[in-house]
Amino acid sequence: MVQDAHRVNRKILAREVRVIGEDARQLGVMPTHIACRIAEEKGLDLVEINPKAEPPVCKIIDYGRFKYEEAKKKRESKKKQTVVQIKEMKLRPKTDKHDLAVKIRSVLRFLAEGNKARLVIQFRGREIVHPEMGQLVLQKVLAALGDCAVVEQFPLMEGRRMNMLVAPKPGARIIVPPSAGSLERDDRAASSRDETDDETDDETDDETDDDETDDDETDDDETSGEIDDGASDAADEELASPPDTPPA
């Protein structure tokens, strides 16, 4: 059973208490049993709200409603509290360019969410004799983060691990770049649009060429017709004219 956080009514141990009325008016110091009787007459409770005062301070209120309001305040206060998490990002001294870009994007996402990021360089085998390689990777990450982050713990060797802690810079506007996959999809979509435009242009050019060919054929037919008509007329004239009379 959960014990009440406040003493109420006959559970108040002090012989005298300073009483505050339900309207927040000071009623003064009085014996506890009299204060309890006043609260009972009003259908309310006498609640000890400051037991460390001399004498203890009590208030005449509805205790059920008082507990509800207290719980509500705690819930609202808890909502306003920001829980900062530390998320770990593991790296290698020889992390390639693509993997490093992916991990930097993840760190930016951590910072944008208000969290801190612990960057861990894990050394294997004889890599441990070249700590400068790990420092170089961390420098690249810091350069990529730019003004988005502040270093809370500078690179520190712990066994075979080099750790560095970064936090979001207060007031910084952190933008997480799109992933490489989304960029590739955008490039493919753009290429597809370009190919579609090229096909449309080719079809338009073919139609234009066909129209020009049809026009040329029409012109040729008309010219041939004119030539044929001229030849026929000349032949008809030769047949219609009488033959020349030979001289006597």
Image (tube, rainbow, N blue to C red):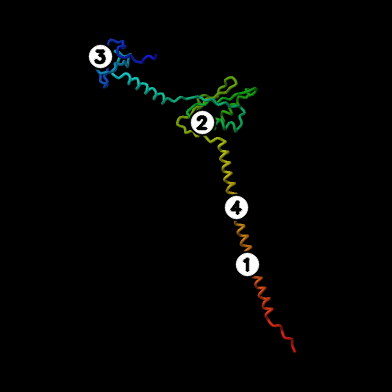
Is 121 above or below relative to 186?
above
**What is the three-letter code of the residue carrying label 1?**
Glu
**Tag 1 secondary structure:** helix
Distance CA(mark 3)–CA(mark 4): 99 Å
Q: Which residue is mark 4?
A: 203
- Density class for disc 2 (Cα within 10 Å; few <14, some 14-19, many ≥20) is some
Q: Quadrant of the C terminus?
A: bottom right
Q: Quadrant of residue 97?
A: top right
Distance CA(mark 1)–CA(mark 3): 125 Å
Q: Which residue is mark 2?
A: 109
**What is the three-letter code of the residue carrying label 3?**
Arg
Q: Residue at x 28, y 18 (%)?
A: 44
- Density class for disc 1 (Cα within 10 Å; few <14, some 14-19, many ≥20) is few
Q: Residue furthest right?
A: 248
**Is 41 in front, or is 22?**
41
Is 97 above or below relative to 34?
below
Name the mark nearer the viewer: 1 or 2.
Answer: 1
Name the mark nearer the viewer: 1 or 4.
Answer: 1
**What is the three-letter code of the residue carrying label 2?**
Arg
Q: Quadrant of residue 171?
A: top left
Distance CA(mark 1)–CA(mark 2): 75 Å
Q: Which residue is mark 1?
A: 222
Distance CA(mark 2)–CA(mark 3): 61 Å
Name the mark nearer the viewer: 4 or 2.
Answer: 4
Distance CA(mark 4)–CA(mark 2): 47 Å
Q: Which mark is residue 37?
A: 3
